[in-house]
Amino acid sequence: MNDDENHNDKSLDNGTTHDNNNVNTRKSVVGLVPVVQDYAWGIRGMDSRVARYALENKALAEVDPDTPYAELWIGTHPKGPSRLKTGELLQDAIGEELPFLFKVLSAGKALSIQAHPDKENAERLNDENPSKYGDANHKPEMAIALTPFEAMCGFRRLEEISFLIKKHPEFAACISQDAKLAVFLASEALSQKDALRMLFSSFMNCDPEISSKQLKLLLFRLQAEQSRFHIHPHDEPAWERKCSRAIMRLAQQFPDDPGAMAPLFLNYLLIAPGESFFMAANEPHAYVAGEIIECMACSDNVVRAGLTPKFKDVDNLVNMLTYSMGGPTIDGGAYSADNPDVIRYSPPCPEFEVMILTVDPGKESLYKNPGVPVIMIVLEGSGYMDGKLCRPGRSYYWPANADDLLFTVAAARRGAMKVALAHKNLHLDRPTAVNPLDFGGASSRNVLSGGYPASPRMPYMGMGGGTTPVSQDRSLMDVESTINTINDIPFM
């Protein structure tokens, strides 16, 4: 880096035109130092995007090749508060806590089977067990893939679970007779939810000796069926084969943990870079592998039940889930009406939304200040922000009263610069993550009036699922046509 670039970096880090101690005088972006979290499921060393970004931000002095770098936190949460490059806390610079927490996540192996509580449950859990549930806030979250990303999200449809119970007697042996009978006979929506609850509770509370024995038997059979010695190794639908292979993979990561059978009742997803999904409170999920940016309400509450050596709270998890069926809608975002270079990802909750700005070589893009505090991170490519150098991994705070920003990329560059920007949701009336007419079975009026529905209805999209960004002014389908479209999708 030459002297001019060093000078530009310092100007960007300070981000002030007058008194550095007065945040109201800031007229430009300010460099941030995020917080690194290393967990057993992270990606080790420089293979982790979290490690590379942390090194670029000087959150790490060096990268340990053996450390699993898992999460990069950018925000004001007390467990990992970010600081400005000037040394002061981000919360002090803003004058209040951000309503969201922005993360980069690098998963080398599966995270726990978990859900995040809604506000009512969060307040109760924080009151009953503050050492395990450190705040009283809910935690809806949205994930946007940076690499191909695997996850288990939401319960499978009951028809699929019923089929898998019959196909895998080892799985069936971990479920009570009453629960299996409820699954086979359930027909109406309420009875299906009750059946799902009975099945999940029965499986998670199965005698460990029984579940461990049955897992070993299941693995022995699946390994034989998936090997080249099997007479017809591919004589089954692709989704069943992927389900079986996912079980074997999880069992290698977590030996003797019955949670390895979770793909038999949770949807197993693979999303491409640029695709996203929204996980509302009280919905089961487990991220499996890959790298994402993740934005959520400012909370660290997690209720776990499997695939983890950490504290498991099965009873609370069983009691708090909504038992909706089908995986989350895969969202490709929507083109911004204000800037054609921006794709926005807006969930149906007020705390946050994420914008992805892409500037191609030889181009420039003027980004208007949205009037609220913004957290930014450069995802890939290099360029300039108001003439100051930006590099992949660097993160910034853009004050609400600062000037608009001009992003440019030199024509000689070999690729585009991509920047992720997170701030308070300014498009709550136009969410991209779910159809606002079908959020939690409620009308969009309930969302807009300030309510916090626990969960969206999550239709099972099968092999379909629109992942192409839609025009922002595209009219939404009416409820009847939406339901008809979903019902026409073939069962897989």
Image (cartoon, rainbow, N blue to C red):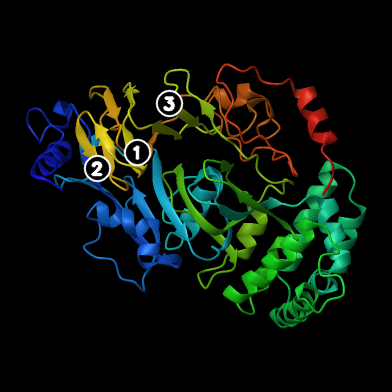
Task: Please report the residue visible at 47 percent of the width from the left and 18 percent of the height from the top.
Answer: 337
Q: Mark 1: few, some, or many residues within 10 Å (few <14, many ≥20)? A: many
Say which label, 2 or 3, has the lower sequence index. 2
Residue 282 position, x and y percent, is 61, 48
Left or right: 309 in relation to 80 = right
**Element marked by disc 1:** loop
Structural distance between the alpha carbons of marks 1 and 2: 9 Å
Contact between marks 2 and 3 (CB within 8 A): the answer is no
Give residue 341's mark.
3
Residue 43 position, x and y percent, is 43, 65
In this view, 20 is above or below 260: above
The residue singled out by tag 2 in the image is 90
Task: Please report the residue visible at 44 percent of the width from the left and 54 percent of the height from the top.
Answer: 105
Task: Please report the residue visible at 35 percent of the width from the left and 40 percent of the height from the top.
Answer: 414
Say which label, 1 or 3, has the lower sequence index. 1
Amino acid at the residue labelled 1: Leu
Q: Mark 2: few, some, or many residues within 10 Å (few <14, many ≥20)? A: many
Q: Mark 3: few, some, or many residues within 10 Å (few <14, many ≥20)? A: some
In this view, 96 is above or below 200: above
Q: Nearer the viewer, residue 223 or 175?
A: 223
Amino acid at the residue labelled 2: Leu
Give residue 98's mark.
1
Question: From where the camera sits, is residue 432 visible?
Answer: yes
**Element marked by disc 3:** loop
Left or right: 133 in relation to 368 = right
Give residue 415's mark.
none
Residue 153 position, x and y percent, is 64, 51
Structural distance between the alpha carbons of marks 1 and 3: 26 Å
Say which label, 1 or 2, has the lower sequence index. 2
